[in-house]
Amino acid sequence: HLNSILDIIMTSTKDFIIQKFMQNLSDYRIYVIDGKSKYCLLRIPAKGAFIANASQGGITKETNIPNELLDYINTIYLKTKVPFLCVDFLKSKNKYYFNELETAGGFHPLPDPTNKLVGKEFFNVAKKYFG
């Protein structure tokens, strides 16, 4: 598979980010709403799983946003100006790694009543920017 991936990358005009595979890591999903870091979901993978996905047996719980991520999240928001954004970071030992960002990350894995609050804020932001 690696050769196929390298063929695609080498013949493409697009930019790619390649990162080291890091197995069995928890991740933090930060919900950024209208430029403010509002909520954080800690996602823990199921035993033997490669990703921390609730739909694949992972555990999710609401937690505080790690302070060391706030500047990174703010920079991402300022560069993208996306009004509703989910930014994911992997955590290995005491170090965080940027994983991905999504413009429509789900709020259903959040516990009640936070999921309803995020859903309401998402639709308010969509109405504000898109009518």
Image (spheres, rainbow, N blue to C red):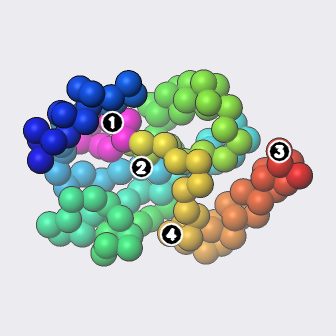
* Residue wearing tag 3: 129
Question: Residue 53's spot in the image, x, y percent?
Answer: 35, 64
* Residue sitting at x 55%, y 29%: 76
Q: Residues within 10 Å of mark 2 (few under 14, many from 20)?
A: many
Compared to residue 125, the image places residue 75 above or below, namely: above
x, y (%) of residue 128? 86, 48
**What is the distance, in whole Å, between disc 1 and disc 3 at their CAs?**
32 Å
Residue 96: image tag? 1
Marks 4/2: CA distance?
13 Å
Give the residue drawn at x 14%, y 66%. Answer: 48
Q: Could you tell which of marks 1 and 3 lies nearer the N-terminus? A: 1
Judge the density around disc 3: few (<14), some (14-19), many (≥20) Cα neighbours within 10 Å: few
Can residue 74 be seen?
A: no
Q: Are marks 2 and 1 in contact (CB under 8 Å)?
A: yes
State the mark number for residue 28. 2
**Three-letter amino acid code at disc 3?**
Tyr
Describe the element under mark 3 as helix, strand or loop: helix
Is 112 in the magenta?
A: no
Helix, strand, or loop for circle 1?
strand
